[in-house]
C-alpha cells in the first residue's frame, strides 16, 4: 500500500521508498526511514498536501511524493 | 588575548536565530553568503578575555549535498574549520535534531550542544539527562531557553573552556558498525597511500564517509572518480551484506545512533498532556475553516501593512515635500543661490531622500508581520493550506503571501520572498511580482478610465488586474521552462509547533531589513532620483518639450507607434513613470496642463513645527482608525483628476489606444524602488532578466491589444 492511500488517522509502517537520489535522501533526513511508524494526521483543505506524524513531529508532503512511499497498515 | 571562530548550526525551528540574537544581539551583521541569496549573519564580540567570531550557518536538517543551505553549511565547517560548533537542538524534538549533531561530530570539531527550548520540553514532561549525553558523545551539553536568555552565559563559558584546551574536547568517534568501519579503514589507507595531501584539507573521517556515500560534490572536489580500486573494494565490502544504496544505509545508521542516544537520555513523564499545537491545528487546518482563516489572516496582514502604514508614509511625504523643502528654499535663497540650484536641492536631492523614506513604514510593518507569521509557526500552515493552488502554477505554497502583498506594493513582496526555502522559489516568485497591479498604478487607471471609459470603468479596471495575474502566471511558466529549468523542489516541510516569537527577535529582524533597504536599495533610489531631475530640468528653464526628457521622448516615440501612442508626451510620461508608476499622471499633467507658478505664503517656523507634530499625532490616530474601519481602501484613494487634463487626453488618445497604454503601464518596467530592492536582494543578473522581460512583454501585449482591436474594428 502507498502512503498516499492511507486514510486520516491510520497508523502504518514504512516499508520502502521507491525513489532515488536527492528526494529519497531528503525524506530519510526528515526521519522517513524503512520500518518507521507513521500516522496520517491531516489532509490539507484542498486535498493536497498531507500532514503526517513521524519521529514525534509533524511533517507535510505532497501526495506525489507520498505515492513513492510503500507502507503497511499496523493499526 | 585569544580569538576563536565559532559556527552555529542547527535545524530550522530549533530557535537558532533567537539564540543568536540572545548571544550577539546588537553586534550582528547581516549579509548574504557569497553568490547566493541565503542570509549570512556574523558577529564579533568579547567574552571575558576571549574574542569570538560567530558565524550563523543556514538552518538545516542534515548535511547532504543536495540543498543549497546544506552545502553552504558543510562547506563552511569543512573549509573554514571553525574552532567550535554550537549545535542548537530543539529539546522537544531530540531524535531528529541529534541526527544533524551526529553528522557534525563526523567533522572532528569540538561541538557544544545547546539544548534549546528546554522550558517547553520540561513543560511537556521531558527529562533530559545532560550528563549522560555529555558522556555518550564526549561533548559539552548546555540547556538553554533562548527566548529568556537562559543558559547563554553557561554556553559561552563552555566555549571558553574548549578554547583553552581544544584537544580535551575532540568528539568521540561513533561506531557505525563493523561493515562501515572496515570500509572506512580501507578508504583511509587508500587516501594515505595515494593522496596524502587531502588529509591536510579535509577531516579524514568525514572525507572517507563522503567518498563511501559517493557524495558528488566531494568526488568532484577531490578529483576521485569513485572507480578507484580502494573505493571499489570498500564499497563491495558493504554491498555484499546490503541491498540498498550506501547513502541510505548511512542515513539509517546515523538515525539509529540518534535513536539510541535519545532512548538513553530522555525520560518522558506523564506523556499524555494536551498538545496546544494539535488543538490549534484542528481549527486552523480544518477542511472547511482552513482557507477562510488563511484569507482572514491575509486580509488582516494586508490591512495592517498598507492601511496602517499609509498615514505615516503620508506624514513623512508631507514633512519632506512641505516644511523641509520650504526651509531649504528659504536657506538657499538667503545665500543668493541660482534658481536651478534651489530646484536641484529641493526637487532632486530632498525629493530623492523622501522617495526612500516614504517606504520605511511599509517595509518595517511588512517585515514585522513576516517575522511574526514565520516565528509563530503559522507560515508553514499557510503554505500547507495554499500549496495545492500554488503548486498548480508551479510555485510553492509559501509564494502566495509575497504575491498577494504585491497588490499593495511590489517592493515588500521582494522582502517577503525570504519566507521561501529555496533560492529558486525566491527568485521565481520575485520575478513574477511586477505584473501584479500595485496601488501606485491605480491613479493612472483612474485618470484614463475617467476620460475614456466612464460607463464601464469597473470592467476595465478588473480586466487590468486580471490581465496582470495572467501575465504573472505566463511569465512564471516561461521562466520555469527556461531560466529555472529542472525539477521543482519537493515540498517536504516540517509543521513546527506554535510558539510566541519574542519582541527582541521581531525588533532585531525588522531593523535588519530596514537597514538593508535604506543602505542597499536607498542609495540607488536616491542617486537615480537626482539623475531624473537632470533629465527633467536641463537645460534649465526650457519648455518640457525641449528638455532632455522631451528629446528622449521624441526619439523613442516611434517605438510606441504600433501600440497606438507614438507621441512624445506619452513616451516621456512612461519614462518618468519608471520612478514610480503614479508619476505618469504627474508628467502628463505637467505637459498638457502646465501649472502657473504661484508664490505660496511662507508659514512661520514655529507654526511649521507645531503642524509637524500635530500631523504625526493625527497620523497615529488615522492609522489605528484605518485598521478598525471596514475595508476602507484608503491606500487606494486617489485625488480627483482635473477635467482639463482628461479633455486634453481625449484629443490625443482613442479609447483603444488608451487601453493599450494602460496595459503597457500595467506591465512595463517595475518602479525604481522595486528595481534597486531586487538588485539588493538578488543581484544584477536577476535584475537584468526582469528588465528584459518587462520591456518585451508589455510591448507585445499592448501591440496585440491595439492591433487586434483595430482588426476587430474597435477604432
Image (cartoon, grey):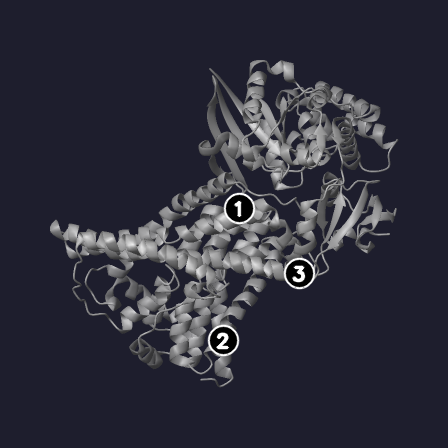
Q: Is residue B425 left or right of residue B491?
A: left
Residue, disc 3: B289
Q: Is residue B13 left or right of residue B331?
A: right
Mark closest to the chain's N terminus, 1 or 2: 1
The reply to the same-chain question for discs 3 and 2 is: yes
Residue positioned 82% across, 53% down in the render: A6
Residue, disc 2: B705
Q: Is residue B515 left or right of residue B682?
A: left
* Direction bottom: furthest residue: B713
Q: Nearer the viewer, residue B487 or A59?
A: A59
Nearest-to-viewer mark from 3 and 2: 3
Secondary structure at badge 3 equals loop
What is the chain letter for disc 3? B
Q: Position of residue B419 (x, y in %)?
A: 57, 48
Query: Dot 1, how many residues are within 10 Å of its Cα: few (below 14), some (14-19), or many (20+)?
Result: many
Q: Position of residue B395 (x, y in %)?
A: 62, 56
Q: Is residue B92 above or below residue B204?
A: below
What is the chain letter for disc 1? B
Amino acid at each position: 500500500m502507498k502512503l498516499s492511500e492511507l486514510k486520516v488517522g491510520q497508523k502504518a509502517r514504512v516499508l520502502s521508498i521507491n525513489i532515488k537520489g536527492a528526494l529519497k535522501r531528503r525524506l530519510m533526513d526528515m526521519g522517513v526511514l524503512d520500518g518507521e511508524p507513521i500516522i496520517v494526521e491531516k489532509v490539507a483543505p484542498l486535498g493536497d498536501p498531507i500532514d503526517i506524524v513521524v519521529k514525534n513531529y509533524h511533517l507535510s508532503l505532497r501526495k506525489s511524493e507520498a505515492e513513492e512511499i510503500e507502507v503497511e497498515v499496523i493499526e | 588575548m585569544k580569538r576563536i571562530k565559532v559556527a552555529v548550526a542547527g535545524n530550522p525551528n530549533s530557535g537558532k536565530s533567537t539564540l543568536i540574537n540572545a548571544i550577539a544581539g546588537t553586534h550582528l551583521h547581516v549579509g548574504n553568503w557569497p553568490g547566493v541569496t541565503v542570509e549570512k549573519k556574523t558577529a564579533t564580540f568579547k567574552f571575558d578575555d576571549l574574542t569570538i567570531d560567530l558565524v550563523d550557518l543556514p538552518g538545516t536538517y542534515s548535511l547532504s549535498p543536495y540543498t543549497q543551505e546544506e552545502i553552504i553549511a558543510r562547506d563552511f565547517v569543512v573549509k573554514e574549520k571553525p574552532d567550535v560548533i554550537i549545535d542548537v537542538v530543539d529539546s522537544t524534538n531530540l531524535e531528529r535534531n541529534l541526527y544533524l549533531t551526529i553528522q557534525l561530530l563526523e567533522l572532528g570539531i569540538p561541538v557544544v550542544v545547546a539544548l534549546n527550548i528546554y522550558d517547553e520540553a520540561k513543560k511537556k514532561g521531558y527529562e533530559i539527562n545532560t550528563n549522560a549525553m555529555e558522556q555518550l558523545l564526549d561533548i559539552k551539553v548546555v540547556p538553554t531557553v533562548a527566548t529568556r536568555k537562559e543558559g547563554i552565559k553557561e554556553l559561552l563559558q563552555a566555549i571558553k573552556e574548549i578554547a583553552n584546551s581544544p584537544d580535551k574536547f575532540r568528539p568521540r568517534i561513533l561506531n557505525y558498525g563493523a561493515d562501515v568501519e572496515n570500509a572506512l579503514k580501507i578508504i583511509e589507507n587508500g587516501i594515505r597511500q595515494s593522496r596524502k595531501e587531502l588529509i591536510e584539507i579535509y577531516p579524514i573521517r568525514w572525507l572517507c564517509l563522503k567518498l563511501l556515500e559517493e557524495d558528488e560534490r566531494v568526488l568532484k572536489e577531490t578529483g576521485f572518480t569513485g572507480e578507484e580500486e580502494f573505493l571499489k573494494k570498500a564499497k563491495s565490502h558493504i554491498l555484499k551484506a546490503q541491498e540498498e544504496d550506501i547513502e541510505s544505509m548511512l542515513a539509517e545508521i546515523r538515525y539509529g545512533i540518534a535513536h539510541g542516544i535519545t532512548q538513553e537520555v530522555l525520560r518522558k513523564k506523564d506523556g499524555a498532556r494536551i498538545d496546544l499545537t494539535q488543538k490549534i491545528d484542528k481549527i486552523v487546518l480544518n477542511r472547511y475553516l482552513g482557507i477562510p482563516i488563511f484569507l482572514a489572516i491575509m486580509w488582516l496582514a494586508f490591512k495592517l501593512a498598507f492601511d496602517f502604514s499609509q498615514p505615516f508614509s503620508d506624514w513623512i511625504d508631507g514633512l519632506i515635500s512641505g516644511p523641509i523643502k520650504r526651509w531649504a528654499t528659504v536657506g538657499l535663497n538667503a545665500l543668493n543661490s541660482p534658481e536651478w540650484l534651489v530646484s536641484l536641492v529641493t526637487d532632486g536631492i530632498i525629493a530623492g531622500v523622501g522617495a526612500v523614506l516614504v517606504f520605511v513604514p511599509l517595509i518595517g510593518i511588512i517585515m514585522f508581520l513576516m517575522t511574526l507569521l514565520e516565528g509563530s509557526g503559522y507560515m508553514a500552515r499557510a503554505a500547507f493550506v495554499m500549496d495545492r493552488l500554488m503548486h498548480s502554477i508551479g510555485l510553492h505554497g509559501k509564494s502566495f503571501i509575497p504575491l498577494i502583498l504585491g497588490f499593495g506594493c511590489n517592493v515588500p513582496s521582494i522582502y517577503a520572498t525570504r519566507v521561501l526555502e529555496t533560492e529558486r522559489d525566491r527568485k521565481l516568485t520575485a520575478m513574477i511580482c511586477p505584473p501584479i497591479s500595485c496601488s501606485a498604478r491605480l491613479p493612472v487607471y483612474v485618470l484614463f478610465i475617467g476620460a475614456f471609459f466612464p460607463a464601464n470603468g469597473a470592467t476595465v479596471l478588473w480586466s487590468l488586474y486580471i490581465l496582470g495575474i495572467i501575465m504573472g502566471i505566463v511569465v512564471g511558466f516561461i521562466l520555469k521552462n527556461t531560466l529555472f529549468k529542472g525539477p521543482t523542489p519537493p515540498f517536504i516541510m516540517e509543521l513546527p509547533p506554535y510558539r510566541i516569537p519574542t519582541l527582541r527577535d521581531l525588533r532585531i529582524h525588522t531593523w535588519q531589513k530596514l537597514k538593508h533597504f535604506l543602505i542597499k536599495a536607498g542609495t540607488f533610489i536616491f542617486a537615480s532620483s537626482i539623475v531624473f531631475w537632470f533629465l527633467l530640468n536641463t537645460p534649465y528653464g526650457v519648455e518640457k518639450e525641449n528638455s532632455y526628457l522631451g528629446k528622449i521622448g521624441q526619439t523613442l516615440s516611434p517605438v510606441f507607434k504600433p501600440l497606438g501612442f507614438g507621441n512624445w508626451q506619452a513616451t516621456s510620461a512612461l519614462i518618468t513613470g519608471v520612478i514610480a508608476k503614479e508619476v505618469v499622471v504627474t508628467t502628463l499633467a505637467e505637459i498638457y496642463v502646465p501649472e502657473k507658478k504661484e508664490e505660496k505664503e511662507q508659514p512661520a517656523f514655529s507654526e511649521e513645527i507645531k503642524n509637524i507634530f500635530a500631523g504625526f499625532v493625527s497620523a497615529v490616530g488615522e492609522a489605528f482608525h484605518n485598521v478598525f474601519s471596514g475595508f476602507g481602501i484608503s491606500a487606494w484613494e486617489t485625488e480627483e483628476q482635473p477635467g482639463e487634463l482628461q479633455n486634453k487626453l481625449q484629443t490625443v488618445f482613442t479609447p483603444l489606444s488608451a487601453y493599450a497604454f494602460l496595459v503597457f503601464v500595467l506591465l512595463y518596467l517595475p518602479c525604481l524602488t522595486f528595481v534597486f530592492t531586487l538588485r539588493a536582494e538578488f543581484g544584477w543578473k536577476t535584475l537584468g532578466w526582469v528588465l528584459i522581460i518587462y520591456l518585451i512583454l508589455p510591448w507585445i501585449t499592448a501591440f496585440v491589444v491595439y492591433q487586434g482591436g483595430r482588426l476587430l474594428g474597435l477604432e
